[in-house]
Image (spheres, rainbow, N blue to C red):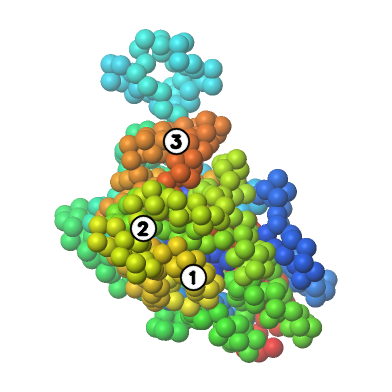
Amino acid sequence: MNNARLMENTARLRRKVTAAAAVAIFAALLSSCTLNPETAGNGARRQDGQKKSMNPAEFQLIGKVKVDEFNDVPMANETPANGGQIVVRLPAEPNSLNVWTSNDAYSSEVNSYVYNALLRRDPETYKWEGSLAERWTEEDMVIKKDGGKLRGTVADTAGASGPVTIKTASGSLTVPCQDVQEVRRGVIFTFHLRKGVRFHDGKPVTAADVKFSLDTIKNEYVDAPSLRNYYKDLETYEVLDQYTVRMTYSKQYWLAREFAGGFEIVPKHIYDADDLQRKDPQAFGKRFNEHPNNRMPIGTGPYKFERWDTGNQIVLKRNDAYWDISRRGHLDRIAFKFVSDPVAALQAFKNGEVNFLPGITAEQYEKETSTEDFKRRFVKIEYYTGGFNYIGWNMRRPPFDDAKVRLAMAYGALDREEFRDEVLYGHGVIVTQSEYYFGPAYDHSIQPHPFDPEKARQLLLEAGWYDRDGDGLRDKDGRPFRFELLLPSGNAVARQRAALMKENLRKLGVDMEVRELEWATFLENISDRKFDACNLGWAIGVEDDPYQIWHSSQSENRGSNHVGFGNAESDRIIEQSRITLDDTERRKLFSDLAHIQHETQPYLFLYTTPNFGVYDKRYRGVKLYKIRPGYDLSEWYLPQAQSGETAQNR
């Protein structure tokens, strides 16, 4: 997500799944979650044996980021130059580049350079700024008991028992308390678009494209259920003129600004030139989901799609006509090369076939990138972005429909501390909930369940699972305790963890089989709920709306609640949190939800880890942000003397 893109696609991105210990999501901080095969590592043990786990109180989310912090090559008097390219590893090939229907981190990273949203959020200050919208206003609404509605700014002194004063376009009005039905704060957004902005094919961006984009997101036949849930309370959106759009929410929502201004604007003339969406929404949805431009997107961003070499790479080309001159990219091209195996990826990097590995394993970081020759040519980086790893239990089917069984897994499946210290070289903090460990909403009073096999045995017995036939496996109702764990292929760390889990569970009389699947197939199995247990991660924002992955409504229709968590109480908490604008009160609700999940264990929460990466020392302008993906390649450049070099020239 240039500084802008890092946060621009926040609404959609926050919760996305990624598939290996790799790049995680990318597009950013909006509140939607992105599936992450697995995020990479946190809190480490140095080679001298001293642990360096970061204290949450020491982690600064806001503030200026150093440029080229890890690069020891002198940079005096260097001027950013245009030219050259960079080849970046993607651990898996995206299914598509449809900006809304593709819910994986890899497509999000590519699209973050292709599209813009109405607003951008500065990744250093976290303040919202105009992007495709040059300015915007936010207003409250007073609903009167007689059905009248007033739009404007409600005075902060308005209380539950007194009159309500609202400043409207025609002046201030005071409404007696007995005449007020409801006060909704921050529910009306009016965006004024920049004039002269064009899509990559030269067509102008207008309010019609904004309305079309919202029509498409809200179309139930478009395969974007995870994104759509953030817009279900968007009551109206109207075109006021060619460059002005007004959006009104039916309820106040603490993330309303992010989602009202954070979705990507797609071209109506490409996807709906014949106005099919208005005539036949179902037919349009099918066409949109399968549209040929899903493999060759057209946006407004600093880089344009150039080509997709199936099985090899996606290449973007600098948009020399990018409307935001101050944020035009320096590099001529960004190539995203698909390399699933981390060993092959590191070898390709050393050979010059790849210039930047955003994610390497802890073992590679500690043992395989520390020679003097390596450090002379390359830069090693360690950076934090929001995310966590987990094992998800399918609560729709036995044995994981029983909370005692899931709790037994927390006590007996994996010694998380030992795994972190021995396999991840101490890099990681064990987590107990889905809010960001270093963010303001994480409840640090909830401690991880310890590794305690005896406690696990007791819980399994209480759940009715014991060995009735003497074959060494627990059974119940004639069924042996046997299940399958799905892994994304190419993830060595997940493979090691699964092997330890299998061994630990066998000692408890449980047989766990492991099956690895290519990323796209893996995601299909998750979306279709064809799994017993799965190994995944979520890329998240600094503070997240839990609705997408935890509300029971998201359990159906291929939503993000793939484990099937939820009941009336958890749904009530989630729904109340969405309309709670007070930070303290909202975070108390998040804590209540975390306590429920701690006892019912829909996930075996694992850890939050830092990302480890390496890049070619020739690149400059590198800033490592604390929001996903953690970097902005449009800021990177090659010094003047090197800008004409190709990716493999050293």
Mark nearer the viewer, 3 or 2: 2
Q: Quadrant of the N terminus?
A: bottom right
Q: Residues within 10 Å of mark 1 (few under 14, many from 20)?
A: some
Lower sequence index among marks 3 and 2: 2
What label sits on residue 474 in the rendered view?
none
Which sits earlier in the primary sequence, circle 2 or circle 1?
2
Q: Position of residue 281 (x, y in %)?
A: 20, 55
- Packing grade of label 3 (10 A; few <14, some 14-19, many >=20) is many
Please state the horizontal and vertical placement of residue 560, each as a whole percent of the image: 37, 55
- Amino acid at the residue labelled 3: Ser
Q: Nearer the viewer, mark 2 or mark 1?
A: 2
Give residue 503's mark. Answer: 1
Q: CA distance from mark 3 to mark 1?
A: 41 Å
| SS under mark 2 | loop
Residue 577 is tagged as 3
Residue visible at 57% across and 52% down?
450
Quote the CA–CA distance across marks 3 and 2: 41 Å
Left of 488 or right of it: where is 445? right
Element at label 3: helix
Residues at circles 3 and 2 in contact by the CB criterion of under 8 Å: no
Q: Quadrant of the C terminus?
A: bottom right
Q: Is residue 13 above or below residue 138?
A: below
Residue at the disc numbered 2: 466
Residue 464 in percent (x, y) is at 33, 52
386 or 487, which lies in front?
A: 487
